[in-house]
Image: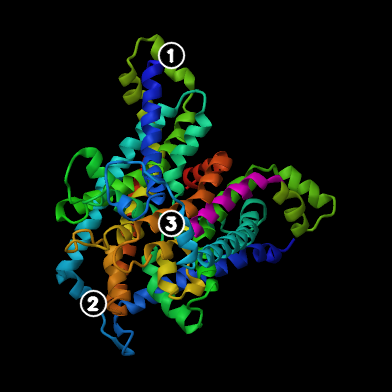
Amino acid sequence: MRRFTFYILLFVVAFYCLGPLLWQFITSLKLGAELTRLPPILPDAPTVENYISIFKAYPFLRVIINSFVVAVSTTVLSLVLGSLAAFALAKLDVGRKGLILAFVLSASMFPPIATVSPLYIIITALELRNTLTALIITYTTFSLPLTIWVLTSFFRKIPNEIYLAARVDGCTVFQSFYKIILPLSAPGLFATAILVFIFSWNEFLFALTFTATIKSRTIPVEIALFPGIHEVPWGDIAAASVVVTIPLIILVFALQRRIIEGLTVGAVKG
Amino acid sequence: MSRRPHVLFLAPAMAVLAAVTIYPIIYVLWLSLHRRLLIFNISKFTGLDNYGFLLRDDRFWNAFYNTAYFTVLSVSLELVLGIAIAVLLDRAFKGKGTMRSIVLIPWAIPTVVSAKMWEWMYNSDFGILNYLLGANINWLGSPIWAINAAVFMDVWKTTPFVALLVMAGLEIIPRDLYNSAKVDGASRWYIFTRITLPLLKPVILIVLIFRTLDAFRVFDAIYVLTGGGPANTTETLSIYAYNMLFQTLQFGYGSTISVTVFFCVGIITILYVRLLRREIE
């Protein structure tokens, strides 16, 4: 292919991927009448009014903190539980590994809608409605299959000799796990952590079902339910979208390689 | 050495998985055999009555059809577009890393945000899409357009996933194969259809499994974009189940619809895994 055509095509792909976000950004700089006027595409008087409004008129900071707490706790919990399980599956002598991995994989196929009604009843019974705990527990479970799957394949890459040498040198099983295996597979842990974080940051169905108060509301629910008194507040929604997307864009640009690694290991091994 | 301490490493994860997936699945099967109204505290065992009703429920079949239409159309478009992007990016060029990050962005954006973004772009009065196309299409308000509008949005959001996995698949193909084909004078198209595609088949099948399952379970994208309207033309099985469960609070019948989604997903998985096994052998 000629160079010129190639770069044109690259530009088309980039524009296709970024276009909608770009439009959301432009919208976020417009107010009132400008929102409902086309042309011009660009605002005559760009303003950050919408960005101020989402933090003043809505409890948006609270919602961001909630999402952050949920995403970080979920990531830590699933990494702890998942790495222990993956270590056993990759390096230890446990029976029926194939069966366990098959079970883990099939758990990842469960449609969330199929478990939402019983979980709602259970969570209500445990008086966990409107708590972040309910979300953290549910998200941890839904990200465990991916975590176990990806980490098992990363741990397997570490030669058995290294693990055995540590054991011969007098490490207990657990010591060899956290002193040898964990540090050696830092990239894998990292890749998994990003995937789990993004999943928890973005989840909607369970968050919508389990939380009804501002004290436990997360970003996706807040944006979906953005209240409009007379009309939909498109400027505010756009500003909120931009704010919650920025951390994800930073993650994607900084850690693109790790994310792709995690995604492909997770999928191709499946 | 005894195996007991080793099992202890596995136990916590398995316990959590069992408590929050296996137990609810059994529970939902049990619920689906009941007439249960949450507000009035009514719960009565009715056997397979809900399933009998399901078969005669037009709204269920409508949702089933919508889900199938959405799944087939969006997954096919994503596959074609994803492979095209992967092939385009499968070469050395300056800024490849940046380009891969750009392609990842739609995948990383929260589904709810993407639905709100598209809802705004689809706006029939002051949406950018109608303006750029010079058209006057009522994207989300017309029964013919709405489901397709949802498909386009999904294609935008998930094509990157397909493209990235296919790219990983392309990297494994030995370059020598291409070179020797070129020496033999094969055309680009010939190389693509006779060498690249057949070697990509396992990767494509895996991508298909993931995408089909995700598309079949679709909830948030469409729920936020259209809420299932207009006139239920975009109501998928997950949305119908959700509305039954949490709007009309019919936990029995709502669970019956959820169970149906569960079994459909199971059947799709088994069919694909069979295909994949045959492919690998």
Q: Position of residue B163 (x, y in %)?
A: 41, 37
Residue A188 covered by magenta stretch: yes
Residue drawn at x 29%, y 67% is A230
Residue A17 covered by magenta stretch: no
> Which segment did they paint magenta?
A184-201
- Circle 1 Cα neighbour tier, 10 Å, few/some/many (<14 / 14–19 / ≥20): few
Which residue is the site of mark 2?
B50
Which residue is the site of mark 1?
B180
Position of residue B44 relative to residue B142, above or below, is below
Q: Position of residue B87 (x, y in %)?
A: 39, 28
Q: Position of residue B19 (x, y in %)?
A: 51, 72
How far is the residue under mark 1 from the one under mark 3? 59 Å
How far is the residue under mark 2 from the one under mark 1? 62 Å
Which residue is the site of mark 3?
A50
A46 relative position to B53: left or right = right
Instruction: Characterize the magenta stretch by its predominant secondary structure.
Output: helix
How far is the residue under mark 2 from the one under mark 3? 48 Å
- The quadrant in which the N terminus of chain A is found is top left
B48 relative position to A171: left or right = left
Question: What residue type is disc 3 on?
Answer: Asn
Q: Earlier in the sequence, mark 2 or mark 1?
A: 2
Position of residue B138 relative to residue A214, above or below, is above
Q: Chain of mark 3?
A: A
Element carrying mark 2: helix
Using the image, tell me which numbered label, if any, was put on residue A87.
Answer: none
Question: For residue B267, what is the image quadrant?
Answer: bottom left
Question: What residue type is disc 1 on?
Answer: Ser
